[in-house]
Amino acid sequence: MYIRTATEPDIPAMLALVNEHVRRGDLLPRTAESIRLTLPDWLIAMDPDGDLAACVSLLYYTPFLAEVRSLAVADKVKGMGYGRTLIKALIEQARLRGVPTLFALTRAVGFFQKAGFAITSKERFPEKVWRDCALCPIQERCDETAVVLHLTPVPLEPLIPLPVLQSEPAKNMQYIIRNNQEGAKNMSKPQVNKVVLAYSGGLDTSVIVPWLKENYGCEVICFCANLGQGDGELAGLEAKALASGASKVYVEDLRHEFAKDFLFPMLQSGAIYERQYLLGTSVARPIIAKWQVAVAEAEGADAVAHGATGKGNDQVRFELTYKALNPTLKVIAPWREWDIRSREDALAYARKHNVPVTHTEKSIYSRDANLWHISHEGGILEDPAQEPEEEMYQWTVAPEAAPDVAEVVKIEFEKGVPVAVNDVQLPPAALIEKLNELGAKHGVGRVDLVENRLVGMKSHGVYETPGGTILYAAHRELESLCLDRDTAHYKEEMAVRYAELVYFGKWYHSLREALQTFIEYTQQTVTGWVKVKLYKGNVIVIGRSSPHSLYREDFATFGQEDVYDQKDAVGFITLFGLQMKVKAMMEVSDGGKTRYAAPDYSKFKRD
């Protein structure tokens, strides 16, 4: 099932579902307008067919009290857990909004008790009694039971009067509220039973495993995505995670999916962040987080965790994906909570908890590697005025040390997707690996970049993206043959926005998905081949061909008049430049001069 906040197009289906339960006497009536005015407070569940399966809303009486109401489940999914899951999501929403107490009036007492609610008295909620119940036609013979759930410990404050309505009974009511806003900052950690951790096998994520168990008392499942980072990083990873305290480890080979469903769609878009960065780390986080959520749902986990720091981009990329795919999951980011502040602190924690650490020496560089690229940060790169040392590079040879003989590579595309290298058909991941090998040998794909992070700081990094650099160059050239001017130019503008969405972690945003639909349409004719010459860091296009090429030599030849009569240019230029002509005519009227009038050479002295 898929749970999300309701939107305006959902209102008719929500109203129909609620009205069916109203007809049965289970719910009070709601109008389309009342739903529209409270849409942010409604959650809905969609079934696998994309139909509305259940809905529920929160009604906020005060900042400290909210009512669960209008819970409705379609008959075709009853008994399948939709109501239970929806209530769980609603409880989490209330917890995130800082509401300490939830209540409901219900006949399904057992259902709410399973969700953690306890039976109580309706008189405990004068807000409900004097606002809604007083107007109910069956108030005297009401057969509903009040249930309550306390989400956070509520410090007892002196009883103070707080009338909700200006009715005499309400003026005499007193009840306990929590009015200490500072208390919200010191709320205890959320209860977590099972968490899925995005695990790399490095020191930080290895230490996170026992830290989660110690601080949250939860079971920890590790998930690692093989995105082509290399056997060295994956070797012994499962055993290490188990030795660190994980109950289970998932290692999924996602190279093919990464290439096919993430890298190639991004390639088709032409997205490049700040004119240089081919988004190797940015585009990897959504697939990792996607599978993390899938594992959490399969394992019945109620939380996910990551090892991103609180000052970088990756925390946003992970957590936006969690929100988009399953907002009911709790998110734990240890770097925003713990007291570990250095590698030495982490090593000490590892020794204390018997976490296996294979080596204690750390490279001065922070790196991220996958099928698409290797990134480098830190060390000498902290000073952008310094040239990176050659020993830093892990993949590409220095251009000056590359072969003295150029190598020609032919790449074939079908609808904007690369399918073959040098006339050999290859699956997506293998094709990228082949181009990485060829590009790295010739020193292709090095980028030294000062970039603007999402969080507002600048950072200096060096990237190696050999195969991606070749593919971008070849794809761009094939598009130059197959796309008309207006489409090509608009697509270039759109690519800047697409790159920002990927960099900012919004892969699953509706705008990125909508742009992808436009991109797919533009790629229908981008089929053909491109030849490039690789030579000492350069990718030089030397040929391109497509059965859908818009370039025709006979059309472009100036000697031919069948398609284009050169006399037509006079009228075109007149109309195209009319606004410029009118402006100049205004300037010279009444004896004036245009701003580009020739200078008076008589005023210049001769040597």
Image (cartoon, helix red, strand yellow):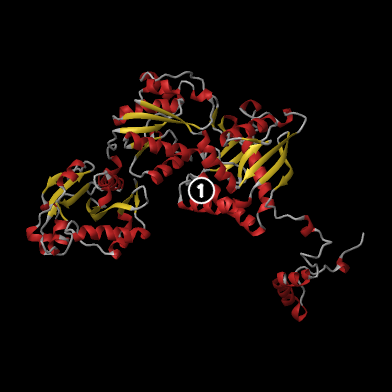
Q: Is residue 395 left or right of residue 197?
A: right
What residue is shown at x 27% (from left), y 36% (from top)?
191
Asked if one can make out residue 181 in the rendered structure from this viewpoint, the answer is no
Image location (x, y in percent) of residue 438: 67, 31
Image location (x, y in percent) of residue 145: 12, 50
Which quadrant is the N terminus positioned in? top left
The front one of 229 and 433 is 433
* Residue 250, picture quadrant: top left
| Crowd class of label 1 (few under 14; some 14 to 19; many from 20; radius 10 Å) | many
Image location (x, y in percent) of residue 299: 33, 33
In the image, residue 84 sits, relative to residue 255, either above or below, namely below
Query: Mark 1 belongs to which amino acid?
Result: Leu
The number of discs equals: 1
For label 1, the residue is 501
Q: Is residue 372 left or right of residue 338?
A: right
* Residue 142, picture quadrant: bottom left
Q: Is residue 607 left or right of residue 218?
A: right
Which quadrant is the C terminus positioned in? bottom right
The front one of 224 and 601 is 224
The front one of 477 and 194 is 477
Q: Is residue 5 left or right of residue 318?
A: left
Residue with the most extreme left position: 140
Q: Secondary structure at mark 1?
A: helix
Asked if one can make out residue 361 in the rendered structure from this viewpoint, the answer is yes
What residue is shown at x 75% (from left), y 79% (from top)?
589
What residue is shown at x 28% (from left), y 63% (from top)?
34
Residue with the most extreme bottom position: 590
